[in-house]
Every structure is written in structure tokens, then in C-alpha cells.
Image: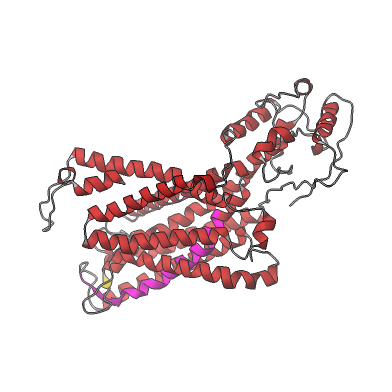
Amino acid sequence: MISLTVSAVLPSLRPPPCPSQVNCKEASNSQLWILYMSLILTSIGSGGIKPCVVTFAADQFDMTKSAVGSRSWNFFNWYYFCMGMATLTALTVVVYIQDNVGWGWGLGIPAIGMALSIVAFIFGSSLYNKLKPEGSPLVRLAQVVVAAAKKRKEVMPLDPGMLYQNKELDAAISVNGRLLHSDQFKWFDKAAIVTNEDAKDSKSPNLWRIATVHRIEELKCIVRMLPIWSAGILLVTASSHLHSFVIQQARSMDRHLSHSFEIPPASFSVFSILTMLIGLVLYERLFVPFARRFTGNPSGITCLQRMGVGFFINIIATIVSALVEVKRKQVAALHNLLDAPQAIIPISVFWLLPQYILHGIADVFMSVGHMEFLYDQSPETMRSTAAALNSLEVSMGNYIGTLVVSLVHKYTGQKNNWLPDRNLNRGKLDYYYWLVTGIQVINLVYYVICAWFYTYKPLEEVKEEDDDVPAEDEIQHKRLNYAEGNGEVELRRNVIV
């Protein structure tokens, strides 16, 4: 942020002003390098902050199911509300300063705000609940795969209770409870088979040869989540046109609020954010208590159901986009403006408002539900990694959106191009919206199938007051005896939450 601000303030680091917009001097290579390096640093910084801030904030609260169910508010709803307020401030106050005061202050104020946030973060560090790092979870996942591959020829025991578990070894990575054995992806369970060689070295197990059930279930959690996560990629692809084609539409429409004031085309995203902010409050205060009466779920509906509603509303928003574009071109044809790309078509820009409102409502369901799902269903030591998947999803979705536009350009040709560069009135943007609608419908079917077969991760809640539950050393001794052929069977009671 400092580099960006300095490049905007010092005349030597930017090209000279060009009010006429004719024969302007381009930025030099050195000036571009400074700009690009500043943007790269911003990307790296965001990559460190965004995945961790939501999980670190959640760590400050009791996020167990019983605690979440007893609260009258949802952490993720209010997290997104705060992020929405920040975005709204950026799109209004900061943009106003950039346009009317200058880029120096427009970039300098966010840089000062970032510096103040770092100071506040450091001085408040002693008050935070901080979990100690316990090694790379990616290494643990690799160990499970390697151990399962090494034991691919071993025979699975009939009783899954004989698979290797080690409470002491997993204590640091199962603070909120150990993951229980599940029947999915049984090939990975081979990593927990206790062989004679493992039994001889029970005190210091080779984790590249044997893995605990908890560590195997960590990998299963990630594998189960990936299909649900991947469904969100095409949702981002479908929404990417809000930052491109809708702005082009807005430029050709009547944007006057009064005789002297016009709404900037790029400012319409404010309506989507405002809808999301209002929608989050209404969701928390009205929808959840209403839905709770029918479902008995403290959250009203599950994360998967919430995401599904978001997918459906997003499809409706894209259909509305197609219908509005048909209306816009009909008005242009009525006034003989199809061949006048610079002309303002006498149709109010507020025809675009419904699709922005619908996208805001979809975010209330999809975006928040998606982040809550990634946090809740990921292993507790991989929650920041799961949050990073959310950012990766946005990136991939936008790249695929660019790919779809490129393919449309390529296969619709020069004469009948759906998305012409110079005259949108002669294009077929509505056809593009119908194409995106079809992609979303297929994606929704895919999501419903994935959600239908999804299995929530099982957690173990140990009741310490139950004296009948055998000690871990006793359980492990029985497992080793089983591996040595003594035929003892472990008896243990688990409570699945």
C-alpha cells in the first residue's frame, strides 16, 4: 500500500496527466514495474490475511456445536456483514476521495488504515486465544497416502475398532475432539492396519508407514469437501459478468437521478452489497427463528441447504439479466439506436437493479453458507487451508469466466459475435446470459447430487465421567495383541456428535 501510494504521489513514478485523453504518454517500464510489484505484494499480503482472518476470528469464540446452537447469532453472518461494510466504504468514501481529491489520498488513507490495524493487532495479541502450530497438515495427508500405498496388499480387519489409534499422538491436533472412523474411502483405512512390524515399534511409530484413524479421517474430510467446493467455481463464473457486461449496459442507459447527477456505471455493485447487508440482518433475525420452528435446527437450515438456495437464486438473477437485455435492445430498436453505440438509450438504468438485488440475496445464502461449510467440515488443523480454498475458488471462477467469453468470441465469429467490442446493441448478450443460465442449471444438478451423498464428519465426544470407557493404553494394548494374532477384541463406546 505504501508503494502504491508513493507511485501515485511522486510525478517521476507515474506518467504525466493527460486531460485531453489524446496522444497521452505511456508509462515507462520502470514505472510499470513499480506498479506491478506493488500489486504482487498486495496479492501476497491478501493471501496471508484472507484465509487466516476468518479462522483466527472464529478461534476467539467457542465454536462447538452445543455453543453455536445456544447462541442467538451466527459468527459467519456477522463476519460477512463486517466485510460488506468495509467493501461498501471502499466503493463509496474511498472512491469519492480518489475521484475528487486525488489518488494520493485515495490510496494513502487505506494505507494508513492498514498500518493502524497492524498496530492494533500487535498490541491486542496478548488478549487473543492462539492455537499453537503442530506441524504441516499437508505432510500428514501425504503420510496417510504413502502409508496406505505401502499396505495396499494388507487385509483389512473385520472390526474397524482394531485400526490404529493413538490419543496421545493426536492430542495436539484434536483439541475439539477426535474424528471417528467412517465407511467412505476405505482404501485409506489400510494406513491404520497394525502389522507385526508396527507392533514391535509401538512407542515411536513411523508415520510414513502407519497412520491413526484421526489422521486418515482428516484426509477423508478434504476429499469429501472437494466436490461441494468445486460447485462454487461455476457460480463465480456466472457472476463475473457483473463487473464487465452489466457496466457496459449501464453506460448505454439513462443514469440520471436528477438533471445534474448521474450514477457512475461501476457504482451499481453498491446495491448488491447493500442488499447483502440488509439480507444478513433479516436472515439472522427473521428467517432463522422462522425456519427453526419447522426444522429444529439451531441455524434454521443446514449449510448445504443454505448453499443450495443461493445457487437457485443466482440462476433466477441470470435469467433476469437476459430478460433485461432483451428489453434494452427492444427500446434501442424502437428509437433507431442499434447502430449508435455511444448514444444513451431512453430506458432507466434501474432496470438493472433487480439482478443486483438478487445477486445480493444469493450471497446471503451461498457465500456465507459456503464459508461456514468449509470451516465446519474441514479438519480443525486445516481450517485456514479450507478458507484459502474459498479464495482459490473465486480466482478459478473468474479465469473460467474469461475462458467462456473467449470461447464465445471464437465460435460466434466476427459478423454474428454475441459480445462485440464496439457495439453491444448489435450483439447477443442475452444469448450469453442464457448460456450462463444453462451452465448454472447443470451446476445446480451436480451440486444437489454431491450434497445428497455428502456425509458430515463424525466427531467423538468423550465422557470423562464414564468409568466403563477403557483407558487409551489399554485400548492400544488390545489392538497390538490383535495384530500379533491373540484375537482380543476392543470394546469401546463412542458418542457421535
- Image position of 444 (left or right of 474): left
Task: Please give the name of the residue rendered at 29% of the width and 45% of the height, measured from the top-left corner.
Answer: 2
Of residue 430 and residue 463, the one placed in the foreground of this image is: 463
Residue 418 screen position, x and y as percent: 33, 60
Residue 202 screen position, x and y as percent: 76, 24
- Please check the rendered image and state whether residue 352 is part of the magenta-colored stretch, yes or no: yes
- Image position of 287 (left or right of 119): right
Task: Please give the name of the residue rendered at 18% of the width and 43% of the height, measured from the top-left corner.
Answer: 13
Q: Is residue 159 above or below residue 256?
A: above
Of residue 449 and residue 172, the one placed in the foreground of this image is: 172
Q: Is residue 421 visible?
A: yes
Residue 292 screen position, x and y as percent: 67, 69
Q: Is residue 331 above or below residue 5?
A: below
The magenta stretch is: 343-371
- Please check the rendered image and state whether residue 361 is part of the magenta-colored stretch, yes or no: yes
Task: Please give the name of the residue rendered at 71% of the width and 48% of the height, measured from the top-left corner.
Answer: 458
- Image position of 397 (left or right of 470): left
Q: Is residue 432 visible?
A: no
Main secondary structure along the magenta-highlighted residues: helix
Residue 315 screen position, x and y as percent: 49, 65
Task: Please give the name of the residue rendered at 59% of the width and 71% of the height, measured from the top-left corner.
Answer: 287
- Please give the count of numbered marks on the rendered protein: 0
Name the colour scheme: secondary structure
